[in-house]
Amino acid sequence: MTNAEDERVYHRLVVTATDRHTDFWLVDDYWHPVQKATGVLDTSLLAGRYFVEFGPAGPSGLAYPVELAGDLRLTQRDLEVGPRCPRQPPELLDDE
């Protein structure tokens, strides 16, 4: 392992949906899917900006930004009263 890999710090993110049957996605800041969950998402991630999308996939949905700088617990209600934006298609990354 390199020193850069040794210095990576992962933070716990827990998101709880209002209904335990609700599907939702966690996507990164390029709109690439990171993880899917039903009811509760409990994961560890590097610090950064992510988005949570509740319900079925589709262009008419909303995404809720999450700035992860430390361990964080959120509910669907917490996210829905905060800022939101339209879902975006994933950005293609250059091969450079």
Image: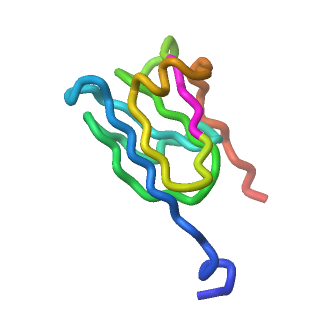
The quadrant of the rendering that contains the N terminus is bottom right
Q: x, y (%) of residue 51?
A: 54, 35
Q: x, y (%) of residue 29?
A: 64, 41
The residue positioned 26% from the left and 34% from the top of the image is 39
Q: Quadrant of residue 40?
A: top left
Q: Is residue 92 above or below residue 44?
A: above
Segment colored magenta:
62-66
Q: Is residue 64 above or below residue 34?
A: above
Q: Main secondary structure of the magenta part?
A: strand
Q: x, y (%) of residue 5?
A: 61, 78
Q: Is residue 61 above or below residue 73?
A: above
The residue positioned 39% from the left and 27% from the top of the image is 76
The residue positioned 68% from the left and 79% from the top of the image is 4
Q: Residue furthest right?
A: 96
Magenta span has 65? yes
The residue positioned 46% from the left and 27% from the top of the image is 78
Q: Is residue 53 left or right of residue 24?
A: right
Q: Is residue 74 left or right of residue 18?
A: right
Magenta span has 20? no
The quadrant of the rendering that contains the C terminus is bottom right
